[in-house]
Image (cartoon, rainbow, N blue to C red):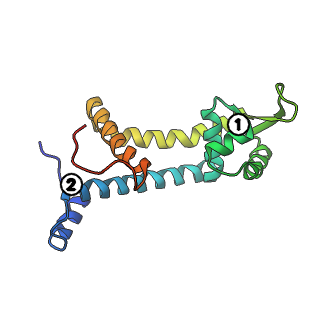
Amino acid sequence: MPTPPDWTDGHVARWQPVLPDLDPDIEGAATRAMLLTDHLRKVKARSLVDHGLHKHEYDTLHTLAGRGGSAVPSELAADLKMAPASITGRLDALERRGFVRRTPSAADRRRVDVELTAAGREAWLGAMEVQGREEIRLLGVLTPRERRTLSDLLRKVMLVAEAGPEGPAKGDADG
């Protein structure tokens, strides 16, 4: 059974007469990727509001959890692509909320270790689970093989994006 048309099919059909050189597959894929990203961003924003978190708080908790629940501020700053001095304010606010704890490092007296608390883990997981359920709901319409293929194709595209405008030549290569 063929897949029914979506909003993007109408969008592409409207633009093809205006832009005769428009590649409908490129326009369709790029538009769907943008719409999907926008949808997931909105789900995340609602989830953060529902869990009483600001995006920067969630991002910091997520980064800390991804390091096993413990890191030094400079590692968090590097992961979050921010200046090391900027992380202090975030950690102050998260510590006041009981989401992180800073303790002197046992390995180096000049260093502070940041630990994710049970409350911080609970807040982070609560927000993340909402997003995860939506990702599963959306991508669950695909078979496991289709999901792997989609992931592999997106990786191929992202490698070009990550390389920047001067990166690998764009072309019709089947690699």
> Alpha-carbon neighbours of circle 1 within 10 Å: few (<14), some, or many (≥20)?
few
As drawn, 172 above or below 12: above
Report the residue at 42% width, 48% height from top.
163
Q: Position of residue 43 (x, y in %)?
A: 47, 51
Q: Nearer the viewer, residue 163 or 112?
A: 163
Quarter of the picture containing the C terminus is top left
Q: Residue at x 23, y 56 (%)?
A: 6
- Which secondary structure, mark 1? helix
Residue 140 in view here: no
Q: Quadrant of residue 22?
A: bottom left
Residue sticking out furthest to the left: 1
For marks 2 and 1 on the same chain, the one whose residue lies earlier in the sequence: 2
The answer to which quarter of the image holds residue 1 is top left
Residue that extends furthest to the top in the rendered view of this protein: 107
Q: Which residue is mark 2?
A: 25
Spatial CA span between label 2 and label 1: 46 Å
Question: Which residue is under mark 1?
Answer: 119
For numbered disc 2, what is the local secondary structure? helix
Q: Is residue 87 left or right of residue 59?
A: right
User: Horizontal placement of 81 versus 72: left or right?
Assistant: left
Question: Considering only vertical position in the picture, is 110 above or below 59?
Answer: above
Q: Position of residue 133 (x, y in %)?
A: 44, 39
The correct choice, above or below, for 123 with respect to 85 in the image is above
For residue 158, side relative to residue 82 (left or right): left
The amino acid at mark 2 is Asp
Amino acid type of the residue tagged 1 in the rendering: Ala
Task: Name the foreground residue: 124 vs 167.
Answer: 167
Query: Where is residue 136 drawn, in percent x and y?
Result: 39, 38
Q: Are marks 2 and 1 in contact (CB under 8 Å)?
A: no
